[in-house]
Image (cartoon, grey):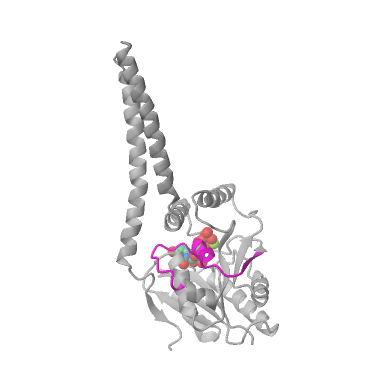
Amino acid sequence: MKPILYIIIPCYNEESVLPITSGLFLDQIHTLISKEKIDEQSRILFIDDGSKDTTWNIIMELAKKDEHYIGIRQSRNRGHQNAVLAGLMEAKDHCDITISIDCDGQDDISAMEAMVDAYLDGCEVVYGVRSKRDTDTFFKKFTAQSFYKFLNAMGAEVVYNHADYRLLSSRVLQELADFKEVNLFLRGMVPLVGFKSTSVYYERHERMAGESHYPLRKMVSLAFDGITSLSIKPLRLIMGLGILVSFLSFLGAIWAVISQLTGHAITGWASTTCIICFIGGIQLVCLGVIGEYIGKIYMEVKARPRYIISERTKKE
Ligand code: UDP
Ligand code: MG
């Protein structure tokens, strides 16, 4: 039996690219159907992440034109990760496989065939991995690579140069549904689900139109979320730092006592100030990191819904 594929596409203020890329996704579905790799029931599922432009109208028009297009709309903008999750959870009971991809045409749509092939060979998770970053500016390349290195150093297991272009089987989706966390970082969560996985390499292009929604500020915040929602290594590092500073202070204290006893004590204003500043700074940073985790716990305890769907193109 051929698998039913749902392509999951989050869209936020994408009126300029959607008319271009929607046709490319449909072509890909038709190609895969004609090669008998996927079922005719396969769909392209757009998730409008509370766009403020005409994105939702475009999605509704597409759905009227061709039955392969369907769409859901979030009640407000909740961010890329939540939009992808909404799409995955919406699709999980209707399909055998999903492929999530951005709507801007940056990720090579034709790599989907290799992903489906890998699934047909028995893989349940197929990561789309960028083979090179030629089209990126030096700044984007540098920040993105530091991002992966930093994440891994901090104990969050992520696939290098893999964003959110990936195939998941419905079995993986069912298991992923049991990961109830509110702080989402899908590319760190998927490896935790396990199952047989592989990677498909592709070249990433430039955005077909419109602008990136991931400025440095959002990337830093995603990196923080990634680290703090996947690992407690920063807390351990703090503890290590605390032990080190305590040890140094202990040595300092012995030195002070000896100086006092041998009569070498001087009015050391500068050294005292330096030590106070140093310890004060470290304590504040450590408190900040602990606060970040407490904030996360606070959000998790409230267990608010991770997405709210306000409209659907297809009435069930
Ligand atoms: N996106 C979203 N909600 C947001 C921001 C972005 O659904 O709040 C979608 C966006 O429409 C696109 C994908 O997430 O399909 C990736 O965004 P973008 O291309 O701006 O990021 P970049 O590729 O520059 O990292
Ligand atoms: Mg993009």
Q: For residue 255, what is the image quadrant? A: top left
Q: Is residue 227 magenta?
A: no
Q: Nearer the viewer, residue 97 or 233?
A: 233
Residue 174, image x and y in percent?
Answer: 48, 76
For this rendering, which residue is in front, 189 or 26? Answer: 189
Residue lying farthest top?
Answer: 263
Point out the stretch of residues depicted in magenta: 177-200
Q: Above or below — where is 26 with respect to 129?
A: below
Which corner quadrant of the figure contains ligand 2?
A: bottom right
Residue 55 visible (yes or no): no
- Residue that sits furthest to the right in the current view: 35
Task: Give the answer, above or below, for where 91 lies relative to 248.
Answer: below
Q: Where does residue 91 sit, x and y in percent of width and height?
A: 49, 79
Q: Residue at x 66, y 77 (%)?
A: 120
Residue depicted at x 46% and y 76%: 89
**Residue 30 spot, x, y in % from top left:** 65, 82
Q: Residue visible at 50% across and 61% down?
A: 188
Q: Residue furthest bottom?
A: 316
Q: Is residue 64 left or right of residue 271?
A: right
Would residue 188 appear left or right of 203 to someone viewing this image? left
- Number of marks in picture: 0
- Whole-percent x, y for residue 66 in the image: 55, 85
